[in-house]
Amino acid sequence: MQISFDPDSSYAAPPVLSVTALNQQVARLLERSFPLTWIGGEISNFTRASSGHWYFTLKDDAAQVRAVMFRGRAQFAGFIPREGDKVEVRALVTLYGARGDYQINVESIRRAGVGALFEAFLRLKETLGAQGLFDQDRKRPLPLFTRSIGIVTSPQAAALRDILSALKRRAPHVRIVLYPSPVQGQGAADKIAEAINTASRRAEVDVLLVCRGGGSIEDLWSFNEEVVARAIVGASMPVIAGVGHETDFTIADFSADMRAATPTAAAELAATARTDWINSLAADCTDLRRAMRRTLSEANLSLDNHTRRLVSPLARIGHQRLELLALSTAITHAVRAPLNRHGLALAQLRARALRHRPDVRALRAEIASQQRHFSASLASQMGARRHALGALAAQLELLNPQRTLERGYAIVSDAHGQVLRVPTAVKAGEKLTLRLAEGSAEVGVASVQAKLV
């Protein structure tokens, strides 16, 4: 069967779309159907291209969608997302025509829960405001002349470097005390409050700065905690809060005695510039010089008036010198006369003592002679007694039982240690102990014989 086709017939085939046209129509359809909307999810497969565009996947437990944020929008994000971050994006649903992939174009991004944090901020602000923590009449003025400044911030924070640079430039004479504390993260609020309480307890500074640099609302949230606000209110010295940038407001700003737009501004508020003090002191010195000249002029006039009424000092001094010389002469005579009298009496007594002093030389010679005689007699007696002692020792050595044992004799004792002298004290079969010259021996008695007459 043959089928003929007439190109001139009235039948018209449906139009054929190219893939590009199809994807463009689908993209327009999606963009019209889904206007800009907020979408929440978790960051995955985040890539930051060299062009500055961000490419990532936004996912939840059951689904995911590709997302792109172009450089013009990404530069205003305020933070760079990381893998696993919970975020909320305001995006346009569209189609990437080159691949036909459904995706979202992100216009803005924020960390998840920012809206809830702002609501919590407003609630806490209202509560503490009702309790009077933000009242102006409660806030203390800053000291006129600051000698020492305390800083509550992180030692690694850029804000600390800005503060130190500003104070070094404006007031290098001010002593600085750092109370280190983390300024963000879990538990940071308690650490900040603890640092403030430590500074309050030590009371070693005139004013306290509570500072950190800018950041998102989550980064600054430690300064929105009630514990920090109450620590600031309870501080024993005025507190200046310099948290974030000029547009950032925290609970700490409202609680502090003064708010600074930035940490550097807090340093400028805490200490008057040294040049200002020097200029003020120079003006005061000029005023003092004028007042001193005026006072000296008036004193000179008064001195001239009194001089004309006074007696000549030279005449008064000459008269007093004569009186002093007379008194000195009288005192000299009054002291020397008793000394001379007592010296003469002492010489007479010394002469009398020499006359009555006995001659002891003969007595000393007699004592020496008797001492020599006594020594000779004592030596003779000691020699005789040593000789007699030697004779007695020799006799005692002859009677020593040990010498008898050494000649072959033995001492016989029974089981009770009694020394046996007669045969009648010995029984047959009894155990006896023989003490010899060296050691002892135990023997048994076979028989006992009486002494033969």
Image (cartoon, rainbow, N blue to C red):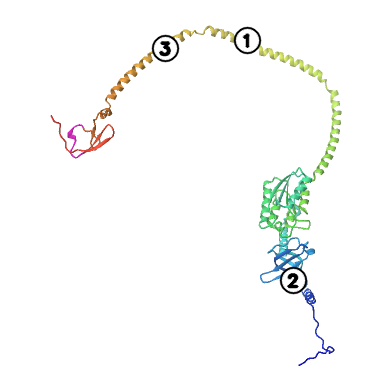
Residue at 48% across / 8% down in the picture?
Answer: 361
Earlier residue among tags 1 and 2? 2
Earlier residue among tags 1 and 3? 1
Q: Quadrant of residue 399?
A: top left
**Viewer-side residue, 407 vs 154:** 407
**C-alpha distance separating marks 2 and 3:** 135 Å
Instruction: Check if residue 401 falls in the magenta segment.
Output: no
Helix, strand or loop status at disc 3: helix
Span shown in magenta: 421-430
Prevailing secondary structure class for the magenta stretch in the rendered image: loop
**C-alpha distance separating marks 1 and 3:** 51 Å
Measured as percent of width and height from the top left, residue 302 is found at 85, 28
Helix, strand or loop status at disc 1: helix
Q: Which residue ends up furthest to the left in the rendered image?
A: 453
Q: Amino acid at mark 2?
A: Gln
Residue 111 visible in image: no
Residue that carries the numbered disc 3 in the rendered image: 372
Q: Amino acid at mark 3?
A: Arg
Q: Quadrant of the N terminus?
A: bottom right
Helix, strand or loop status at disc 2: strand
Label 2 packing within 10 angstroms: few (<14), some (14-19), many (20+): many
Closer to the camera: disc 1 or disc 2? 2
Closer to the camera: disc 1 or disc 3? 3
Measured as percent of width and height from the top left, residue 221 is found at 71, 58
Residue that carries the numbered disc 2 in the rendered image: 103
Residue that carries the numbered disc 1 in the rendered image: 341
Q: Which residue ends up furthest to the front in the rendered image?
A: 2
